[in-house]
Image (cartoon, rainbow, N blue to C red):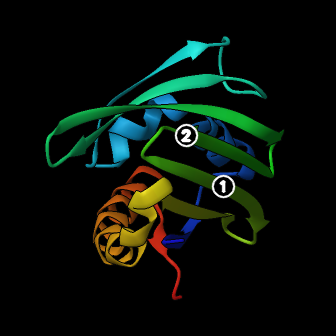
Amino acid sequence: MPRYVVTVMSPLSPEEAFAYMADLAHFAAWDPGVADARQVVGDGPGLGATYDVGVRGVVGVLTLRYRITAFEEPQRFVAEARSCALTSLDTITVEANENGSTVIYDAALTLNGVLGLANPLLGFAFRVIGDRAAAGLVSALSGRKAPR
């Protein structure tokens, strides 16, 4: 299963960082691989909130439906998207630090079924995509990337 983890040190308080990250409509603002994102179930972030996220791909924009499956404000939430082709599991953890907050974004992407044979190749592409998204996240959180 290809995985990408980035840790961002932000001057935002844990509450501010969590509120920003938990609203998946912000995806398009910081991830260049996301064309658009909008909430389709619920009224703001929370358990069960659901978002349609348009992801740019080789053949155009693929819409993934992300659902918040765990929500522990202001420390952690999990967003899951499943389609016939892939499964995306994003776990975001926010911790207080002496200068604001530490945001850990842990994304796992798996191709489903027979496509799973290509997961090793997906891992390479996911690192490139993840690095671009991480740069946008660092900027959005007015922070800096922590060393791996």
What is the crowding at mark 2: few (fewer than 14 residues within 10 Å), some, or many (at least 20)?
some
**Mark 2 vs 1, N-terminal side:** 2
The numbered mark at residue 60 is none
Q: Which residue is at a point 30% across and 63% down the rendered structure image? A: 129
Quadrant of the image occupied by residue 53: top left
* Residue 59, placed above or below residue 133: above
Q: Amino acid at mark 1?
A: Ile
* Residue 20, placed above or below residue 114: above
Q: Residue furthest toward the left?
A: 59
> Which residue is label 2 attached to?
82
Quadrant of the image occupied by residue 1: bottom right
> Which residue is label 1 attached to?
92
The CA span between labels 2 and 1 is 18 Å
Q: Which residue is at a point 74% across and 24% down the rendered structure image? A: 48
Q: Which residue is at a point 47% across and 39% down the rendered structure image? A: 84
Q: Which residue is at a point 61% across and 23% down the rendered structure image? A: 50
Q: Nearer the viewer, residue 23 or 57?
A: 57
Number of marks in the rendered image: 2
Closer to the eye: label 2 or 1? 2
Q: Is residue 138 visible?
A: no
Q: Residue furthest toward the right?
A: 72
Q: Is residue 112 shown left or right of residue 76?
A: left
Q: Nearer the viewer, residue 112 or 100?
A: 112
Instruction: Determine contact: label 2, label 1, CB under 8 Å.
Output: no
Find residue 64 and report its horizontal and vertical position in percent. Answer: 44, 33
Quadrant of the image occupied by residue 81: top right
Find residue 49 and report its horizontal and vertical position in percent. Answer: 68, 23
Find residue 38 and report its horizontal and vertical position in percent. Answer: 44, 20
Describe the element under mark 1 as helix, strand or loop.
strand
